Amino acid sequence: MRSSWLPALLVGGALLVSLTACSDSSDVGLGVGSGLQGGNPSTLDVTPDVRDTTVAPITGIRRDSAQGRPPAQSQNQSAWRFLVGSVDDPTPGTGVVTTDGYVDFAGRDDLPEDLQDASPDALTAELRLTTDYLHGHSSETMDVEVYDLTSEADMDSARATASFDAAPSPVSVNGAQINPSDSLVTIRLKASWISENIGTLRSTGSDFEGAFSGFKIVAPNSEAVVGFSSSTAALRLRTVSSSNDTTTADYPSLKTFTHIERTGAGAPPPGYRLMQGGVGKGLAVEWAFRDSPLDTLESAPLNQANIFVPNDTSALETPSGFERPQPQGYRIIATRSSGAPSCPVVGSVTLSDANEACVLPLVPSAAPASALVPDDVARPTFRQSFQRVRDDQSPVFTTFRVHIADRENTAVNEAATVRPGLPTTLPVLVPVDGTEPGPPRATLTVTPL
């Protein structure tokens, strides 16, 4: 080991370094062991190289196809949503984000006799959608249009950049509107659509699903993006008898998808990097193990480590009447070096053997303020990396990719933080200089020898 590592920590504007001497080993966490005999442990914050990266997220799901789906995604089925509308967030760099929602429905096992026997002109049909997300102006009603899809759409695991062909004319009634702040919205379909599809509506099971391809829902000129629960979305058929008895039948959702695109994006505020959900804008983070100070720590006992990527919530401008929830989670995917230890060896979860990709568990309670990799993952990652670099090999991970992964809430166990996030359009500003709460960094506690 080089003997000059301490002076090296005190120079270089590219590194944010703080040293804090501790009076005894109880101050510095786990795994100290006999390494303390060489001196008092010290803590340093090491900033990585940070650049932008974009990976379109998965925004489609089929609710009955958990078989063959990665477990992390199948566990998200009950919470999945699809988005409709546009938002021009005042945060610089976000641009205008436009979303189109797609939904397909499952066939029923049977249909009530009153609906089977009713004439088409005695029937009404509507979409019933439960709202569970709002980003934008909440006080404005939204014009909405529903279009028939022209063919079966493979929505399952489709990414946000995909789209599916729809008929040119809307099948929703003229002037259909919704209030984005309502907990349940309905969109009525034209009587002519019922007449043209009466045979399909009266079919059941796979016969219905084979004949019906689904809908595309758009909200032209809207000022908000609204999210609808995939699990509760329904197509309702209704008839009212001459004695005013109402009979209804709901076709449950089968699959949903959100197409997301962004226009007019500029630069984020000075001193910040932008992460943005939906369009897949995230950060790629790399630590230079062969540069100071990491190159001087190859043999120093590592007592504790964390990886921290902050969200400066105070930097987001929120005008009156504008709704912007905070993302309830993040996802960090790390790319393994060739020949590096497997994902479980360093406490992470295998995402793809072929792509050498691991998902790092995070501290769930740290969101939305930060993405925080805990000691039981960060420490073996850095410890193994130091060993590999000392043996003239690459570190365990070459790159860490950080993205927003919005989830139901932060009250989830650590294992849940490896799941893909729900479709979202939310922005996050990450400081890249000394502004509080500071830039992305690894916090390492070491014992000098």
Image: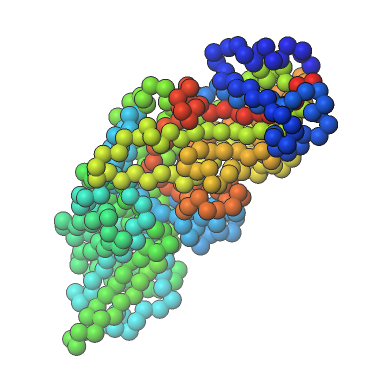
x%, y% of residue 165? 34, 48
Is residue 407 left or right of 350 when viewed as pictured? left
At 26% from the left edge and 63% from the top edge, which residue is drawn? 186
At 33% from the left edge and 66% from the top edge, which residue is drawn? 235
For the N terminus, which image quadrant? top right
x%, y% of residue 115? 29, 79
Most foreground residue, 36 or 296: 36
Color scheme of the displayed model: rainbow
x%, y% of residue 405? 49, 44
At 69% from the left edge and 15% from the top edge, which residue is drawn? 6
x%, y% of residue 87? 29, 41
> In which quadrant of the rendered view does residue 205 lie?
bottom left
Is residue 294 left or right of 161 when viewed as pictured? right
Most foreground residue, 194 or 265: 265
Q: Is residue 338 visible?
A: no
Is residue 380 left or right of 230 when viewed as pictured? right
* Residue at the far front in the pictured view: 23
